[in-house]
Image (cartoon, helix red, strand yellow):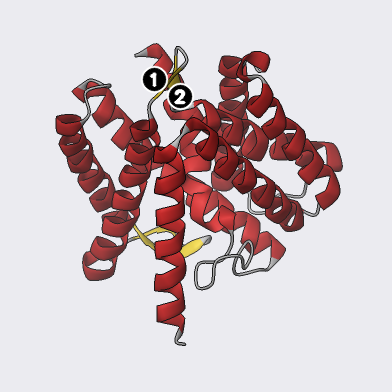
Amino acid sequence: MSETVKRAISGVIYIVLLVGATVYSPLSFEILFGIFMLIASYEFAKLIKLPAFLCILLSLVASSAVFWNRDIFPIKIIAVFAVIILLALTAELFFTKEGNHSFLIKLGIFAGYILASFITILYLPFSESNYEPNIVISIFILIWTNDTFAYIIGKKWGKNKLFERISPKKTIEGFAGGILFCILASIILSLFFNFFSLGIWISSAIFVGIFGTIGDLIESKFKREANVKDSGNIMPGHGGILDRLDSIIFVAPFLYIIFQIL
């Protein structure tokens, strides 16, 4: 079986599983993303050389707490904490070449980048105890639109490198094109889903385009420092769970705060 066929099959399985579990019920959504959190915790622990057992244990405790009692977490505080860590990682991405951190700093990064971000994802489709799966599906549509058109436009017209030190293939033209088509996709989504205003849809698209790209760059930085191509090999042709979810991990806390404010 060729690599292209493997990639296509595993990609279809991933999308069907993600969309199916999210749409089917709140329980299936929580179970799937709880499992994603566990796998991502293991992969990230390996990347930054943290004890895998500790990270998996913390992830298991966090996901179980959400499962048994959704009110246990002060989610707004957790989302703000995640944003602080993500902005710190963004500053490090642009202003330092190497991330040589102590154990406690690495643990703090894990807590904000993985645990807090995934907990925020688990709260995204819930509003006043109502479950709206299309919120999550729509965010993934925006992410996939941004990634797809950034690749297409960058490959065809890209000339100026966006961040060559970390990701040589990304271009400024692709970045701008991805955001443009992401905004167009958000306008189309606003015609079908009225749980957000047009302003929130467009704002979400801009944040997805900017911070989804930064999330991809930061995960690439972690992989470069670990000297690995993929975060894992659970998805043939695609790598690990972190490789597939790096954008929503980074975007979710920002969007949650936007949704709460607007």
Q: CA distance from mark 1 to mark 2?
A: 5 Å
> What x and y, as percent, mark residue 26?
49, 31
Dot 1 falls on a residue whose secondary structure is helix
Viewer-side residue, 87 vs 68? 68
Quarter holding residue 15: bottom left
Q: Quadrant of the C terminus?
A: top left
**What residue is drawn where x is 56% and y is 16%?**
76
**What residue is drawn where x is 60% and y is 27%?**
84
Q: In the picture shown, does residue 169 fall above or below 162?
A: below
The crowd level at tag 1 (other Cα within 10 Å; few <14, some 14-19, many 20+) is some
Check if mark 1's residue and mark 2's residue have beta carbons within 8 Å.
yes
Q: Amino acid at mark 2?
A: Tyr
> What x and y, as percent, mark residue 254?
46, 28
Q: In the picture shown, does residue 127 fall above or below 20?
A: above
Q: Is residue 192 visible?
A: yes
Mark 1 highlights which residue? Answer: 259
Q: Amino acid at mark 1?
A: Phe
Mark 2 highlights which residue? Answer: 256
